[in-house]
Amino acid sequence: MSQPTRPRILVVDDELVIAATLASILDSQGFDAKAYTDAFEALKAARDKAPDLLICDVMMPSMSGIELAIEVQKFCDNCKVLLFSGQAATVDLLRVARAQGHDFELILKPIHPCDLLRRIQQAFDSVPQQA
């Protein structure tokens, strides 16, 4: 009997401590979570194996989290996205993305791990069940 596959989550933050800590917490909760500090590396990983969920900081040096989410959803339209940020400028970036037809959920930093897990569960609960 095969084991059920664990939901694949990519955690992307340019701060290694944040990305690695979140991925570790998610792994301990039954997810297959991988941490990335570079958006382009995360994009390559998503192309290699599609994630179920992308958790991404909005403000990163190489590519914004919004740009990364849009790129991932071009080839993985079933991937859920949770963006997080501690900066007020994020609202303007989200407004531009929404004008282009992308509606991403924003989580403000800092977030308690229990609250993050609840938001992740809500994201997966909103996925229509396949027959």
Image (cartoon, helix red, strand yellow):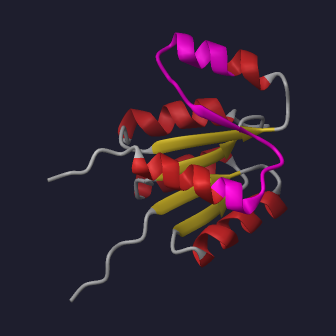
Can residue 4 be spotted in the picture?
yes
Q: Which residue lies furthest to the left in this view?
A: 131
Looking at the rendering, the stretch of residues picked out in magenta corresponds to 94-116
Image height of 97 relative to 61, above or below: above
For residue 60, side relative to residue 45 (left or right): right
Q: Residue furthest top?
A: 99
Name the spot of residue 10 as percent of width and height, x first: 57, 56
Name the spot of residue 115 as percent of width and height, x first: 69, 54
* Rendered residue at 45%/54% (across/down): 51
Q: Which of 33 and 125 is in front in this view?
A: 125
Total labels drawn: 0
Q: Quadrant of the N terminus?
A: bottom left
* Rendered residue at 73%/15% (across/down): 92
Q: Is residue 98 magenta?
A: yes
Image height of 9 relative to 30, above or below: above
Name the spot of residue 65 as percent of width and height, x first: 66, 36
Q: Nearer the viewer, residue 59 or 44?
A: 59
Image height of 8 relative to 74, above or below: below
* Rendered residue at 50%/13% (across/down): 100
Q: Does the magenta stretch include residue 111?
A: yes
Can residue 42 be spotted in the picture?
no
For residue 11, side relative to residue 126 (left or right): right
Name the spot of residue 87 as percent of width and height, x first: 85, 31
The quarter of the picture where residue 98 lies is: top right
* Rendered residue at 25%/50% (across/down): 129
